[in-house]
């Protein structure tokens, strides 16, 4: 993989018209006009079009991996999104037991970090980790 003068991958650079860029200035595989196999007659990605019964949709007309009724691969045993489940210790849950993208404490700590402020905070541990560590709370380092 070599980079162009714009410090982008040569084949994907729009300014240089790399091999992966079509004359509509889109990546060839995403262009609605150049790659007609990727899109249906409704101008949607074929796999996700409800009218065309896309292959990535379940019988409930939802994305198969995220359907709670079908037990999709992205749904945990608590019928929640795996990444956002507090009890499972999801990857999108911060140490304050909130979603990382909406936790005000995490955002303020990024900009004004002070060990004195968070030194003596005791936080509860999600149920999933309680059985592993045999405790219900921990002291934030």
Image: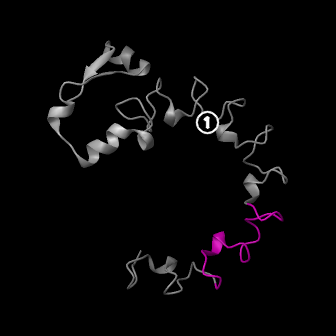
37 in magenta = yes
Please tell me in which quadrant of the rendered image residue 103 appears.
top left
Tell me if mark 1 has few (under 14), some (14-19) or many (20+) residues whose alpha carbon lies within 10 angstroms of its own.
Answer: few
Looking at the image, residue 131 sits to the left or right of residue 33; the answer is left
Looking at the image, the residue that sits furthest to the left is: 116
Image quadrant where residue 107 sits = top left
User: Which range is magenta?
Assistant: 23-44
Depicted 135 relative to depicted 119: above or below: above
The residue carrying mark 1 is: 73
Q: Quadrant of the N terminus?
A: bottom left
Residue located 27% across and 42% down the image: 109
In the rendered image, the vertical position of residue 46 relative to residue 1, given as above or below: above
Nearer to us in this view, 125 or 134:
125
Above/below status of 99 relative to 124? below
Q: Is residue 107 left or right of residue 75?
A: left
Q: Is residue 41 left or right of residue 25?
A: right
86 with respect to 66 (left or right): left
Picture residue at 17% right of the left edge, 29% below the top: 119
Q: Which of 120 and 20 is in front in this view?
A: 120
Q: Position of residue 117 (x, y in %)?
A: 19, 33
Query: Residue 108: x percent and y percent?
Result: 30, 43
Does residue 140 belong to the magenta stretch? no
Who is closer to the viewer here, 37 or 94? 94
**Vertical order, 60 against 19 (above or below):** above
* Colour setting: one colour
Residue at image position (84%, 54%) is: 52
Secondary structure found at label 1: loop
Residue 51 location, x and y as percent?
Answer: 85, 53
In the picture as drawn, the residue positioned furthest to the top comes out as 134
Dominant secondary-structure state across the stretch colored magenta: loop
């Amino acid at each position: 993989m070599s980079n162009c003068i714009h410090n982008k991958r040569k084949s994907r650079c729009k300014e240089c018209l790399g091999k992966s860029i079509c004359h509509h200035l889109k990546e060839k595989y995403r262009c609605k006009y150049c790659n007609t196999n990727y899109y249906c007659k409704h101008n949607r990605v074929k796999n996700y079009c409800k009218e065309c019964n896309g292959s990535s949709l379940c019988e409930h007309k939802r994305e198969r991996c995220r359907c709670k009724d079908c037990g999709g691969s992205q749904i945990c045993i608590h019928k929640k999104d795996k990444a956002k489940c507090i009890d499972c210790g999801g990857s999108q849950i911060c140490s304050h037991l909130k979603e990382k993208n909406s936790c005000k404490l995490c955002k303020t700590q990024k900009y004004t970090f002070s060990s004195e402020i968070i030194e003596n905070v005791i936080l509860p541990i999600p149920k999933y980790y309680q059985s592993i560590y045999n405790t219900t709370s921990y002291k934030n380092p």
